[in-house]
């Protein structure tokens, strides 16, 4: 549990031109980086019209400040992880935060507040952060305390196997096979529903499940996609199959009651999707581990609480 909130300033000026940072920084997935991927993504990220920055609004306050303050993570592989060489924060959530900063300010300048699940609502309500990008699942209960733009991404349960495994492309293919799941996790009822003939083997922690998979104590491991892609990022012998088969909608956390800013952020999200920025952010991060094309972005306002 994180008792202290650490703050790191992330300088993002001149990403496209800063060739030394691009060439020496470690990619989100070692060996999978594309040339100047972050710079290319942000180069095509839209900028808001001046008329959209309304007087007295949260947008105007952020623009005058000259940086977007984001509640997020510094240690989430593929999502929001600080590069030990360049100092930049990389991944899907991180890139989305930078793109929003560019939309408001004209430059992708952000400051990351490394937040924890139990501190996010307070950080938004007291104004410490402007937004939260941190795999923040939208629920009606949370929506009573914070506002959610989006959803901007849908995660959920998916399947991991040892690289080279064949015959498993969807949950139903787990029928008749030994399948690993974490004890007391949503994976167990999901497997029973979609593959009732599967033999489920449970372990108490994710590392134990991963070890069991590598030891062939099961042919597949069912877990939340974000956790599995992080595992696959660290261990190239593991492969994630397909897209999630359950839904876990992630929202952009905003201060409760600021409907003006919520509308603004939702408009930005639509524009990033139309411009292909959202899809490129996915390909540069999660898509380096998950097989297939970028999924269709979730429909904005499509879940209770959004």
Image (cartoon, grey):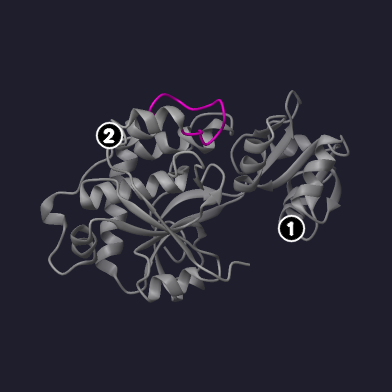
Does residue 28 show up magenta in the picture?
yes
Return the x and y of residue 279 as percentages of the image width and height.
41, 36
Q: Which residue is mark 1?
A: 185
Please name the residue shown 14% across and 63% down the image: 54
Q: Earlier in the sequence, mark 2 or mark 1?
A: 2
Q: Quadrant of the C terminus?
A: bottom left
Secondary structure category for the residue under label 2: helix
Judge by depth and name the residue closer to the eye, 102 or 297.
102
What predominant SS class does the magenta segment belong to? Answer: loop
Q: As drawn, is 104 to the left or to the right of 229? A: left
Please name the residue shown 29% across and 71% down the image: 258
Does residue 35 show up magenta in the picture?
yes
Judge by depth and name the residue closer to the eye, 63 or 306.
63
- Residue numbers of the magenta segment: 25-37
Res. 34 visible in picture: yes
Judge by depth and name the residue closer to the eye, 215 or 108.
108
* Residue 156 tag number: none
Q: CA distance from mark 2 to mark 1?
A: 41 Å
Q: Quadrant of the N terminus?
A: bottom right
Return the x and y of residue 99 as percentages of the image width and height.
32, 45
Q: As drawn, is 159 to the left or to the right of 291? A: right
Mark 2 or mark 1, whichever is nearer to me: 2
Q: As drawn, is 191 to the left or to the right of 212? A: left
Res. 37 visible in picture: no
Return the x and y of residue 85 as percentages of the image width and height.
49, 38
Q: Which residue is mark 2?
A: 43
């Amino acid at each position: 549990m994180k008792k202290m909130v650490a703050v790191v300033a992330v300088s993002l000026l001149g990403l496209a031109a800063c060739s030394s940072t691009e060439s020496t920084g470690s990619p989100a997935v070692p060996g999978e980086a594309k040339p100047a991927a972050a710079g290319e993504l942000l180069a095509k990220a839209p900028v808001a019209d001046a008329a959209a920055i309304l007087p007295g609004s949260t947008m105007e306050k952020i623009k005058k400040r000259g940086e977007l303050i984001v509640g997020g993570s510094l240690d989430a592989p593929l999502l929001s992880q600080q590069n030990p060489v360049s100092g930049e924060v990389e991944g899907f959530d991180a890139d989305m935060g930078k793109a929003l900063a560019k939309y408001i300010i004209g430059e992708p300048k952000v400051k990351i507040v490394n937040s924890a699940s139990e501190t996010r609502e307070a950080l938004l309500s007291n104004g410490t952060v402007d937004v939260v990008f941190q795999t923040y699942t939208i629920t009606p209960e949370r929506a009573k305390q914070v506002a959610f733009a989006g959803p901007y991404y849908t995660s959920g349960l998916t399947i991991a196997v040892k690289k080279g495994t064949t015959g498993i492309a969807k949950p139903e293919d787990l029928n008749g096979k030994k399948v690993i799941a974490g004890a007391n996790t949503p994976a167990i009822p999901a497997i029973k529903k979609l593959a009732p003939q599967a033999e489920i083997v449970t372990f108490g922690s994710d590392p134990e499940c991963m070890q069991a998979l590598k030891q062939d104590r099961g042919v597949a491991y069912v877990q939340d996609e974000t956790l599995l892609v992080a595992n696959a990022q660290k261990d190239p012998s593991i492969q994630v199959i397909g897209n999630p088969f359950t839904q876990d909608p992630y929202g952009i956390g905003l201060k409760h009651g600021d409907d003006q800013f919520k509308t603004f952020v939702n408009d930005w999200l639509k524009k990033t999707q139309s411009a292909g920025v959202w899809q490129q952010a996915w390909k540069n991060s999660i898509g380096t581990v998950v097989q297939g094309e970028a999924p269709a972005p979730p429909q904005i306002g499509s879940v209770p609480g959004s």
